[in-house]
Amino acid sequence: MRMFMTGALVGLVVALITAPALAQAVEGMTEGEFLLMLLRQVGLSGMLPDAATGIDAVEMMEDLGIIPVGGWDPGAMITEDRIIEIAEAAGVDTTGALDIGAVVQAIADRLMDLFAFETESSEAIAVSSY
């Protein structure tokens, strides 16, 4: 239930952000800062250490199997092209994607799906070990 509510809230927030507003919001942001923002917005900040850095966010993305072409560079400035690359690494179909806000929403949705799967897998392992 909480995951659904978090997803709905993220969807609402991202839907309210137009592509130009999103571009402006991430302007001057590094790749690591963008990932931290994204992970916090989908409710995964509790999985990060206190005072998490961009490197922590990158490590979490790698743990989820999301590694864009060329790897991560937490200190590099984020661009719309890089957001597309991150989406594709997450398994999001970006064919014909014109709205960067929709792409960010799709990444958020994918992260929530991956986290839910990992949680279910962990619970299944815990249950089967009894």
Image: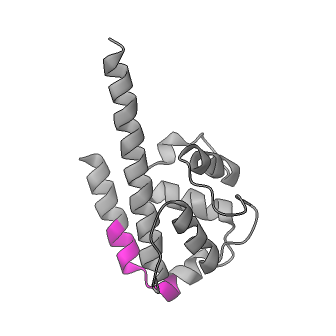
79 relative position to 39: left or right: right
Q: Indicate the position of residue 13 as horizontal and vertical percent values.
A: 38, 71
Q: Residue 33 lies in magenta, yes or no? A: no
Q: Seen from this angle, which residue lies furthest left?
A: 1
Tally the numbered discs: 0
- Residue shown at 63% from the left, 61% from the top: 68
- Residue shown at 45% from the left, 66% from the top: 92
Q: Indicate the position of residue 116 as horizontal and vertical percent values.
A: 36, 44
- Residue shown at 48% from the left, 42% from the top: 46
The overriding secondary structure of the stretch rendered in magenta is: helix
Q: Indicate the position of residue 20 as horizontal and vertical percent values.
A: 51, 88
Vertically, is 14 above or below 43? below
71 relative position to 12: left or right: right
Which of these two is toward me, 85 or 26? 85
111 relative position to 60: left or right: left
- Residue shown at 33% from the left, 55% from the top: 6
Instruction: Say whether residue 115 is visible.
Output: yes
Vertically, is 41 above or below 45? below
Q: For the magenta stretch, what is the residue range?
A: 11-21
Vertically, is 58 above or below 129? below
Q: Indicate the position of residue 127 as horizontal and vertical percent values.
A: 31, 20
- Specify the quadrant that holds the C terminus: top left
Instruction: Say whether residue 42 is visible.
Output: no
The colour mode here is one colour
Q: Seen from this angle, which residue lies furthest top?
A: 130
